[in-house]
Amino acid sequence: MASRSSFTRSQKADYGPEENEQTINLERFFVAGDFVSGVGYGVHLVLWTSCALYLWKQRRRNWTMKALLGYITVLFLVETVFSIVQARTVQLLYIENRNYPGGPWQYFLNTQDQPVNVIFYACIFVMTFLCDAMMLWRNWVIWAAAGTTRMTAYLVNVFPSIMLIVSFVMGTLWTLQSSHPGLSMYSKQPLAYGTAYYTLSLGTNVVLTMLIIMRLLKYRRALLDCLPSAHSQHYVSLISIIVESAALYSAFAVAFLVSYAIDAPINQIWLAFAISAQPISTYLIIYRVADGQAWTSQTLSSQTMSAVLFRSDSTVQQKRSTEGAERAGNVYSLALDLQAGHKSTDGTLRTLDSRSAMMQLVGCS
């Protein structure tokens, strides 16, 4: 019995690959990453369909809806091409060239100049740039909603914009170097470009994420002090902050960057998660925009906030909504500069102390 089991083990070992453990792990994680990408594409399809339906129904509302519809369509087409190329790459590695000298991974490294691999890198680069650009736009919108001048919102976005431009240049160099004959994304020079590119791209996302989170937390703190919690949660819940800031992608991007920089095989898994998470974050933001739940430059305007403040099923509050809208005035300034306030027993604002007469909002007694 013992001799039979030892023979079986040795026989199984003979069927194993002859590559070193590092290469074998890269191949394992590459296949696992392909599975993650496939699941991610399914999620993208569902989210794209939902967003597209919302945006199509509201295409006549303003040009932003049409622009976002075009944006998500381009993004989804790039994702589709990437998924096709990813599947084709796995087929070439593990089926059509399974006996390549050095194994499937060596074949992958030696054929980076083939069109399928060039498209592979190009799709990653384009998807990342499109999603980074969306984050930059959302940061501008959220800062513009503060009631400050547009110049302030522009100034806040100057540094992230420069980072995005530089990352675009580095991403272009990384794509070209990685697809150069005899090189790959794991070669010395492409690895340096890739590390710099993902550092800049991740840095851009982290900076934008922090700017958005800080601004939304400031709104949250101010609005929870001066608005009924049921109304303020519409825009400043913790879930909305996580979605608006695309924190999901930032977490996976950090994991990929660290593992990629130290050449850990598991970077293939984190890359797949990051590639899937970034469009998911983008779709969730656009879904909120289409559904009217996301922040806009008019979120803290008197018209928008009065609708939130005085929304109720009661007839009395419906009759007083117009009067309340007029009294709301510059409520966005209230949210930023208000020092103290208290609520009445029915949940609406009763009196609020402020620095100017325009910062007063009186609710129903």
Image (cartoon, grey):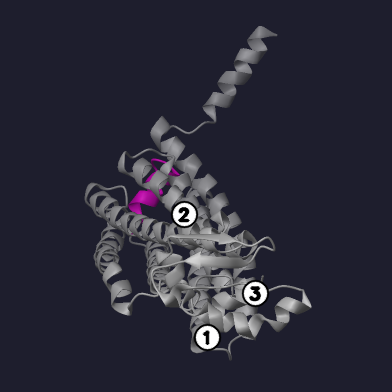
Q: Nearer the viewer, mark 2 or mark 3?
A: 3
Labels 1 and 2: the sequence-earlier one: 1
Labels 3 and 1: the sequence-earlier one: 1
Q: Is residue 105 magenta-colored?
A: yes
Q: Position of residue 241 (x, y in %)?
A: 51, 58
Q: Is residue 130 magenta-colored?
A: no
Q: Position of residue 227 (x, y in %)?
A: 57, 64
Instruction: Say whether marks 2 and 3 touch (CB < 8 Å).
Output: no
Q: Which residue position is annotated with label 3? A: 310
Amino acid type, callout 1: Lys
Please tell me which residue lies in front, 278 or 345: 345
Residue positioned 39% across, 40% down in the render: 102
Q: Position of residue 272 (x, y in %)?
A: 48, 52
Q: Nearer the viewer, mark 3 or mark 1?
A: 3
The image quarter containing residue 262 is top left
* Boundaries of the magenta span: 101-112
